[in-house]
Amino acid sequence: MAKDIITERSEDYSAWYNGIVKHAGLAENSPVKGCMIIKPYGFAIWEKMRDQLDKMFKETGHVNAYFPLFIPKSFLSKEADHVEGFAMECVVVTHHRLMKNPDGDGVVVDPTAKLEEELVVRPTSETIIWDTYRNWIQSYRDLPLLINQWANVVRWEMKTRAFLRTAEFLWQEGHTAHSTQQEAEEETRMILDLYAQFAEEWMAMPVVKGVKTINERFAGAVDTYTIEALMQDGKALQSGTSHFLGQNFAKAFDVRFLNENNKEEFVWATSWGVSTRLMGGLIMTHSDDDGLVLPPKLAPIQVVIVPIPKPNEVINEAADKLVKELRAKGISVKYDTDKKKRPGFKFNEYELKGVPVRIGIGKRDLEKNIVELKRRDTMEVSQPSLDGLADHIEQVLEDIQKNLLTRAKNFRSEKTTVVDTFDEFKEVLETKGGFISAHWDGTTETELKIKELTKATIRCLPLDAQEEEGSCILTGKPSRQRVLFAKAY
Amino acid sequence: MAKDIITERSEDYSAWYNGIVKHAGLAENSPVKGCMIIKPYGFAIWEKMRDQLDKMFKETGHVNAYFPLFIPKSFLSKEADHVEGFAMECVVVTHHRLMKNPDGDGVVVDPTAKLEEELVVRPTSETIIWDTYRNWIQSYRDLPLLINQWANVVRWEMKTRAFLRTAEFLWQEGHTAHSTQQEAEEETRMILDLYAQFAEEWMAMPVVKGVKTINERFAGAVDTYTIEALMQDGKALQSGTSHFLGQNFAKAFDVRFLNENNKEEFVWATSWGVSTRLMGGLIMTHSDDDGLVLPPKLAPIQVVIVPIPKPNEVINEAADKLVKELRAKGISVKYDTDKKKRPGFKFNEYELKGVPVRIGIGKRDLEKNIVELKRRDTMEVSQPSLDGLADHIEQVLEDIQKNLLTRAKNFRSEKTTVVDTFDEFKEVLETKGGFISAHWDGTTETELKIKELTKATIRCLPLDAQEEEGSCILTGKPSRQRVLFAKAY
């Protein structure tokens, strides 16, 4: 049983997570500290996420481009907050050649091949992109620029975990340029909505949309918007961010344009990104002690057919027909004819990998005109008729997609607590976890104090929060809106 | 006219190439030496190439994965030829943190954040992938592994040119593992055929399939296969390579498997790749003095509709109908309603960008039930009827795709010369250029001598060459097969 392979959540949540990553074949550590290898099955899921996001970006008028991996070190310093935020995590290229080791085996860095200016491996690309935009933008007619790039970035981290925090990760970063503040702010919010829609409709992962506190803002942003999801262990996961950058980068890189009245202005900017971190969110939102659970829309294999106990002519015929019908509906299906593995072994394997629907076809069932169907989300087994089976499976896949979202929403509701005192706050945090909705006096000082005392951070000021008079749970000072606290990844 | 913007080929071929890259909006230099910025229009073409290749890889059983950007320096040395081939081009990461400059402005490398072992930015990924495969392969049941990755790689170059030779470039690298030599060799050749098919059917770029000489082999390969294309200036472009690696990397990284007879063997390997260099090949195969010429299958915009002189109700109605009909056929079309630009300006712009078909719709033509159609490949203008126009355009696009391939094949035939003496060889090389089919004695010494004397290299030993007794053009020594020489990019 899969249960014997993977540590149970209740026993050790972190070991459970690592077990899923390993046994579902998603990723593994590489010999380079903090860098992971994304294995074929994990990458196939990421490809589905990427392709859908890319489609949504293009439908909203964005185009892709590609900017260099390296950034001249001096560029980073041009925006003061930006360099402050990223300098500690930057890996640096200093030389461009190796040579034979004059004192022994192998190769060493050739000391004569030192770069004039060190290059930083991009931790994010605002600086090199805004340096480029200076030449691309002269007049309001050149605006807006709505550009995205899919790329790898590197932020050196001491403690890393597959997908959630790795030195190198894959992401998309949108960088847009606008002629007015309003248009840039609308873009920032539109992308936030797009991210939330993707998270809910594709990942079946409900998110809270909100704005970050000053303390949690992106380095160089005027406002950072975020989508925050809640994991099964009651910790929050920041899953995507969309930044209104004001004119900060335009000023740092001197990017001006002539407006319709022929007057010169600085350009308004946004940037936004989601990364392979979403894979971590996907795993921790739905999976269980039997392995990965995938929403059908992101499953590389949506239906697996297993012959019981092994393939024969009659079973093959029924299976081939079903495969054909499902493929005609655009459903991805695998018929596993491997004779070396027994059905029970296969069942475990596909449960570990989170395949949403498993169909078992046996000779005796065929005589009764039925098959065995197992849903991965509920583990329910049923015996649907062969008649109209493809239609039925299509319906089950839709049900699973909906059920996963509903389940995750219910979980989040249960794990969201409104508290009014600091004692309550601490108790909920320790016993129940989850999101805590509480009043806060709006100062960074109080925010940091609460973090120091409890490890909880302000995840966001939810966009849908009502104005409500109250007093800060720590200082008792007046507050006009509840904010969302949680321990977070 | 576009002719006034771009230097003519006859005047300065290199300036012409740079002009196309710039004025068609494909790419530009970045502030990082040798690294280019791929602009949205250029990237849209690359995306089309990538998506088609990806489809072809998947249809032949390959899956994608992702391996780290960084490679521990010591890994490179494990395969002797490999390190020899790449050490001179490797950029090296030595530190993982920046700090405020204690002596002035900006940031400097933090000397306390030195990496224990320097990391090389991957110039290619054989070493880190075979280090990983050691853990993935135990028995013949784990084979074959058919894995590809789309990635950026870095090879420091002193002289760079957009797409053709850049320090950072985008590519795909396939890395497969097999239980027998035969299967690995078949994979190598199958991928070569796939590359050739892609080049001809999608890029309309004919290629010669062949095997490289020892001297031109990939560092670490037993055999390197290549597709070689001929550019309009008579120089060859190596456009893709597929390597049979034997057991070299399996031995270097100790990757063994138990075969069906329970005996331990080293695994057999291949690797293969094409890169953004293909963009250079695409440009130089078809484009002319008016700008880029694109084969319809790779054109981001296949048809552009221009209202003459500007949009009005009658013209919009006809254009909208045509747009709808073309889209229903899966043809990408843009209706350019920009009122600020005159038709002549738009004509030039879309010719520069290589849009295959331009439709001009004017009121007077509409009264006659016709439009104006201009083909980008031949620059021919015609007045087709509105009746059945979408069908007609579809046919014209197919014609253009075919015509570009035929034209390029004819050009290559004209520019391929069979010679039997070294004097003839030198004369053809100087006056006509192109591929030269000649006898060679099979030694690296002669190959290098010819290169030194003429700058021509052996592009490949064509796979379809006939056995033919002859004598080497330089040494007069016996030869049994003609090889293909050319000056090359």
Image: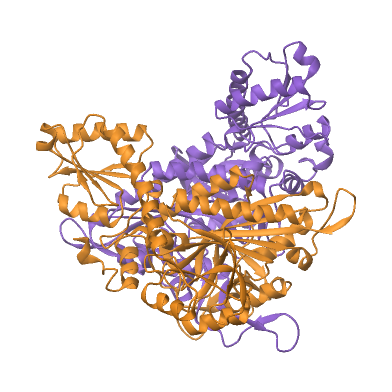
Chain colours: A purple, B orange
Indicate whether B73 appears above or below B49. below
* Rendered location of residue B163, percent (x, y): 44, 65
Which residue is rendered at x = 78% and y = 32% of the image? A347
Indicate whether A329 appears above or below B351. above
* Rendered location of residue A99, percent (x, y): 64, 83
The one of B360 and A282 positioned closer to us in this rendering: B360
Which residue is rendered at x = 29% and y = 38% of the image? B393
The one of B463 and A36 positioned closer to us in this rendering: B463
The one of B404 and A291 positioned closer to us in this rendering: B404
Q: Residue furthest right?
A: B262
* Rendered location of residue B274, percent (x, y): 53, 59
* Rendered location of residue A70, percent (x, y): 50, 69
> Which corner quadrant of the image does residue A57 belong to?
top left
Which residue is rendered at x = 33% and y = 38% of the image? B395
Left or right of A20? Residue B140 is right
Residue B488 showing in the rendered view: yes
Which residue is rendered at x = 30% and y = 74% of the image? B12
Residue A174 showing in the rendered view: no
